[in-house]
Image: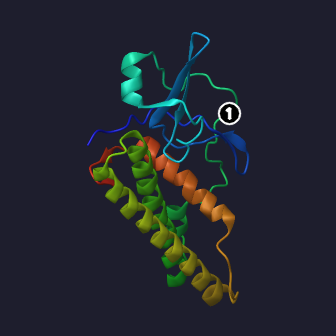
Amino acid sequence: MEEESNEFLCEVFLRLYRPGHCPFPGTVVRHMVYRGKQLRTILCGEHVGVFEGWETSPIQVYRERHELVPDDVILGVRIWPSPDITCFEESASNSETRTELNMWTAMHRAVKSHACWRYWLGHYAAYPVPVNRGPLQDSYGNWQRAKDHAEGMYRTYAREDHGQEYAELPEGFLHSIACKAAENLRSRKVSQGSVSHG
């Protein structure tokens, strides 16, 4: 299995907690020639559908044919994790009860599952062949189960440690999971079939 380069980031502009570009690794280039000029944008697997009708090439293929510089100038800023993003590992080490520890552990596992799903989403976008469809579907199922488990553990923590019934997982935690998954994919090598967490 070929590995995507972790040095390119998606150029889609988002507005989450604050405006900026998608923080997930780019995996494909959508491109076209317009009035003699080569237009292109780097996209992650989730955003591969923008600019419908443009050609799609894996980053490596496009880079061999055209100049492509990592972190080339784009309009606007990047969405980087902010200082208030929850650190699940640190929170787990500071847990005061077993219920709280279980909740932070579930959050950390959700980060791993989310990163693995985002990797396969991007890999399938770059190489949409049947052999990649199974791992993509499996990783999505794992992410959904991890997310459901994290939500359940948060409800248990809120009920048992704070007496709150029917507590919903705060959106800030989901935002933290997504930011940490993006960091995971930027900083770690991807091995066959899974994201390496060594």
Name which residue type carries label 1: Val
Check disc 1 and report its element: helix, strand or loop: loop
**Which residue is found at the position 45% from the left and 15% from the top?**
67
Q: Where is residue 114 in the image (x, y as percent from the top left)?
A: 47, 59
Front-most of residues 198 and 56? 56
**Which residue is found at the position 42% from the left and 31% from the top?**
57
| Residue 96 visible within the image | no
**Which residue is found at the position 63% from the left and 25% from the top?**
74
Q: Position of residue 172 (x, y in %)?
A: 67, 62
Q: Is residue 189 above or below residue 154?
A: above
Q: Mark 1 points at which residue?
A: 77
Q: Where is residue 21 in the image (x, y as percent from the top left)?
A: 64, 38
**Which residue is found at the position 36% from the left and 19% from the top?**
64
Q: Say left or right for 154 vs 192.
A: right
Q: Is residue 139 above or below residue 31?
A: below
Residue that sits furthest to the front in the current view: 53
Residue that sits furthest to the top in the current view: 36
